[in-house]
Image: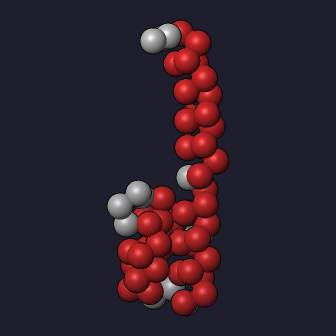
Amino acid sequence: MGIPELLTFITAMAPISEIQAAIPLGLGLHLPPLSAFGWAVAGNFFIILPLYLVLRYGSEWLMIHFSF
């Protein structure tokens, strides 16, 4: 994995840009279209599991320790 792939992957993880900016960025960095798409989708999916786990267990912890 080189710098263009890493930049495409990280850009796809950002909530504001996501895939809409990651694919054109990958193409601008001279990645093949299928590679740019693949790295963008992988970056977009990669953030889902950690975010889900933080929200799930974080909300459970908050409900246990802070009752209203």
Instruction: Tell me the quadrant of the picture where the C terminus can be found.
Output: top left
Q: Which residue lies furthest to the left in this view?
A: 16
42 w.r.t. 63: above or below: below
Front-most of residues 49 and 62: 62
Give the tally of numbered discs.
0
Percent x, y of residue 24: 40, 83
Task: Answer whether residue 27 is visible to the viewer in this image.
Answer: yes
Where, by quadrant of the figure, is residue 25 drawn?
A: bottom left
Percent x, y of residue 6: 50, 65
Instruction: Tell me the quadrant of the picture where the N terminus can be found.
Output: bottom right
Where, by quadrant of the figure, is residue 44 drawn?
A: bottom right
Task: Answer whether residue 26 is visible to the viewer in this image.
Answer: no
Q: How does the figure colour the protein chain or chains?
A: secondary structure
60 w.r.t. 44: above or below: above
Percent x, y of residue 54: 57, 34
Tell me the residue at 35%/61% (across/down).
16
Tell me the residue at 60%/87% (across/down).
34
59 w.r.t. 39: above or below: above
Percent x, y of residue 11: 42, 65
Tell me the residue at 54%/90% (across/down).
33
Tell me the residue at 60%/23% (across/down).
60
